[in-house]
Amino acid sequence: MAAAPRALNVNVGVLGHIDSGKTALARALSTTGSTAAFDRAPQSRARGITLDLGFSCLRTALPPRLGPGPGELQFTLVDCPGHASLIRTIIGGAQIIDLMMLVIDVTKGMQTQSAECLVIGQIACQKMVVVLNKIDLLPEGKRQSAIEKMTKKMQKTLENTKFSGCPIVAVAAKPGGPEAPESENPIGVSELIEVTKKVKSMQMFHTPVTYAMQGDRVGICVTQFDPKLLERGLICTPESLHTIHAAIISLKKIQYFRGPLQTKAKFHITVGHETVMGRVMFFSPAPADFTAEIEENVFDFEKDYLYQEEYLSKDSNSSEENKENDQAGEVQLPKQQWALLEFEKPVTCPKLCLVIGSKLDTDIHANTCRLAFHGVLLQGMEDKNYVETFLPKLKVYKLKHKEGQVERVMDDYSVIGRSLFKKETNIQIFVGLKVKLSTGEEGIIDGGFGQSGKFKIRIPDGLKPDTKMLLNVASKKKSKAGKGDTAKEDESSKNDSAQPVTISLLFKRYVFDIQKKMIQS
């Protein structure tokens, strides 16, 4: 059989809330269906809903502006499930589409999964057509005004998205509903078709082809192979996919997700066509680099990064180290943030692929977006012992800030401090670290003093006269109070604590440093 001329293929995702009529629309548009199209699977027929991706195609003449000579334009329709519990399949389908059709039940408007599909579309594709379906259910005398009202609502919904101004088409894919006779002609489908856009043998919708490319759906004839042994997978060029146990991603929070994104939290992570549970750790540039330009889709292992308890956003709780860089009380946000994802089981995916984090265990009846963040996979970790072999290369640090008080003066160049360490702390590991007094002097921890967690600080440039006077007065008050009764001692302590000389110890510690070294600049 001779191979037909190659058609220009465009993958069109059909997404929307359950029972919005997506499958009926795909059937009305299609000229050829595959074995998986139109809910032909026994499980789908039994439950009356779409359970997996359905594929069909529409072929039409190639518009002159898309290429010289005769040819065809082929739309491969990817019918995605609408049920909330099948969002993994929806996300998987969205990653292979060029154009999205968001199907809306015109009698109900935007619903929960409609909104989630819109979010997925904003992440995964650049073009969208809104289809207002089931217009046959509107009273004929009020139909046009109802369509216009819903069109305006959708335009308002989309005005702050990348799809602002996209085409909105009204149709009835299956007039009369599922039980209506096949003789009932769809309404408005011809107008929708005019929204245009850019192994032994293979067939594409029963048409022999000689090659296939990314995004194509093809039937492949493989001899001496039991298809029952094969689950959904990926066919790829050798070495283009990698199986990884963890990953570094650049990411953005999805604005419709309520609540913070917290480090150590677990999310459903969709990578390629797989969804697994994963734990996250968020980090950002060092505060001094918050406004620096970041090279896109590249991760620099030579730089230091700041550990974050949660993804930084306008409504997040700024960490202590970030507050120091805040101006006029506003939270300063970095231009880029990253996350370390650690998967509960390995996933197979290409480099720089789309990653989506979700909370799919959220009540599906709750009127809330379950999609939390999206990003790009920058670096995968193939070694299952990545904690020992790979993570030490990742220079993410925490800033540690400890505060204590000066108890008394020893001489002009040394003081005794307290309340910086616990009694059981091994002070020896802190010897040599720099500290700063609230009066301005800089000092160095010289060693422990006694057994109660007190320590000696050496002041290389000596104590200021004002500091000595302040400490001597405080020491005399304490000594005087010690000779009196307990009530006087408590009162003296209250007065004394009004202006104590405090000691600040600042250092950073790399999260994945096996030796747990404390570092000061």
Image (cartoon, rainbow, N blue to C red):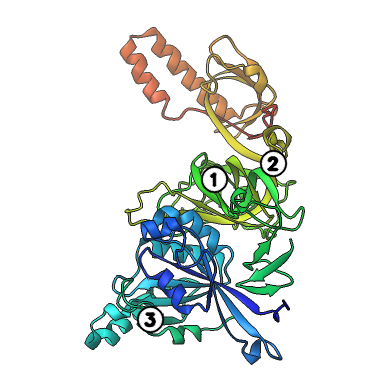
Residue at point 58% right, 34% down? 400
Residue at point 41% right, 50% down? 259
Q: SS at mark 1?
A: strand
Q: Quadrant of residue 65?
A: bottom right
Give the numbered dot on residue 171: 3
Amino acid beneath label 3: Val
Residue at mark 2: 394
Q: Position of residue 184 (x, y in %)?
A: 35, 82
Q: SS at mark 2?
A: loop
Residue at mark 1: 276
Is residue 464 visible in this depiction of the protein? yes
Q: SS at mark 3?
A: loop
Amino acid beneath label 1: Val
Q: Position of residue 252 (x, y in %)?
A: 54, 57
Amino acid beneath label 2: Leu
Foreground mark, 1 or 2, reads: 1
- From the viewer's perspective, is residue 139 above or below residue 381? below
